[in-house]
Each structure stands twice: as structure tokens, then as C-alpha cells.
Amino acid sequence: GLHRRYGVAVDTVELRVPLRETFGGKAKGHGRHVKQSGGHGQYAVCDIEVQPLPEGTGFEFVDKVVGGAVPRQFIPSVEKGIRAQMEKGVGAGYPVVDIRVTLFDGKAHSVDSSDFAFQMAGALALREAAAATKVNLLEPVDEVSVLVPDDLVGTVMGDLASRRGRVQGTEKVGEDRTLVKAEIPEVELTRYAIDLRSMAHGAGSFTRTFARYEPMPEHAAAKALASV
């Protein structure tokens, strides 16, 4: 390797693939941020319901508060707190995507309620809802095109399958080369450049483009979480 040839120390860092989290089912969360000690206290309570949305939908916030249970000026505060918690994650520390959060109830205090208190309550409610259901990991999947000599097509396809790849098809290129197209989770591609080089003895090349996020299977999720 580089170290032997040039006396260079090379740190091989496993790339942290940008996983996402989402809710596996519907759940309710109760967020209570109450600290009342002399002088100005903090008081905010909110009740939310969270439900998963189809992949790629993003985040929806629905206000169903009736009778001023949460005063109008603090409803954006609840949403802000939820969004901040979504950025931090609720399970493994990856951002949360594709959920609808409905704020349906809460309580306020005429003096001690504040923007900050309701942000805290919103964040807490989301964490509590997450604890009441399954949090699923989503992983980015890439479209990969691998160009190799014909006699290596079998080897490359077998290797892609071992990386949870789904081969989409092959096409002939010129005299003796084949383009293999596949969809592969990014987690399985962190060392692909190195592995392809040794598999194809330098005669292979590949390109990749991001396709979408997909639910991560149990076994892969367990492995990803163990390395966090």
C-alpha cells in the first residue's frame, strides 16, 4: 500500500453514511416542561400525535389545538422545538424525516409560559412519542454503473449481490466490456473503489449517483447502530 511505497501514514476512516430516522408507527407524546421556582418560572405542556409519512414527503406540522389550550403565539414555538429535536434524532442520533406531527392539546401559564418553554416541551413530546413506537433507520441507496471486462461480469455481479445490491441489467460496451447497472445501499459502498480495483486488477471503473432513501433491513440497521 501507500505506506510501504512512500512511508506515508494513511488513516482509513470508515465514512459515516448519512442515515435518517423515521417513525415505524403512530404514537402520542406528552411534553411537559415545568420549572416553577421563585421569580419567573418556566411552564409549557403539549400533547402531540406523530405518524409516519411516505418516503420523501418531508415534515408536516398540523395545529389542531382548540379553545386556546396552547396560546396562538406559542404554537410556532412547539413546532420549532420539534424541528430542533428532529435534527438531533430520536433514536440513533440521525435526523428524523417523513413524519406528520399533530399538536392537539396542551397547557400554558399566564406568567411563566414562554417561547423557550414551549420549544422544550415540543422537543420532549417528540422524544416521548419516539419511545412509544419503533424508530426505523432509512439509508441512502445509489444507482451504480460498473464497467468491467466481460470475463469479470459474474464476479462483479456476485460481489454486488453480497452488498445487498439489486442488479438492474447489463449492456455490452465495445468489443469486450460490459456495463453492469445496480442499486446498492451507500453503507455497502464505502470501500467499493478499493475492492473493485483488486477484483478487476485495475481494469474496472464505476460511477454512482444518489437514488433515494429506503428502510434499512434489521440486520444492517443493527450493524450500523453497533458502530455508532
Image (tube, rainbow, N blue to C red):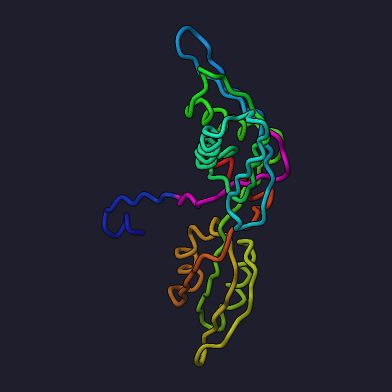
Give the residue at the far front of this rendering: 67
Q: Nearer the viewer, residue 177 or 53?
A: 53
Q: How many marks?
A: 0
Give the residue at the far bottom of this rendering: 175
Q: Position of residue 106 (x, y in %)?
A: 64, 28
Residue for point 54% across, 55% down: 187
Residue range of the region highlighted in magenta in the rendering: 14-28
Say above or below: 36 vs 201: above
| Quarter holding residue 157 | bottom right
Residue for point 54% across, 41% down: 86
Q: Nearer the viewer, residue 45 or 208?
A: 45
Q: Position of residue 100 (x, y in %)?
A: 64, 46
Residue 129 shows in this picture: no
Residue for point 51% across, 65% down: 210
- Judge whether residue 27 is colored magenta: yes
Q: In which quadrant of the rendered image does the N terminus lie?
A: bottom left
Q: Position of residue 43 (x, y in %)?
A: 55, 20
Left or right of 5, for residue 220: right
Left or right of 95, for residue 134: right
Left or right of 50, for residue 143: left
Residue 34 shows in this picture: yes
Say above or below: 29 vs 134: above
Characterize the magenta stretch by its predominant secondary structure: loop
Residue for point 58% across, 75% down: 181
Q: Nearer the viewer, residue 161 or 108?
A: 108
Q: Position of residue 42 (x, y in %)?
A: 51, 18
| Quarter holding residue 165 | bottom right
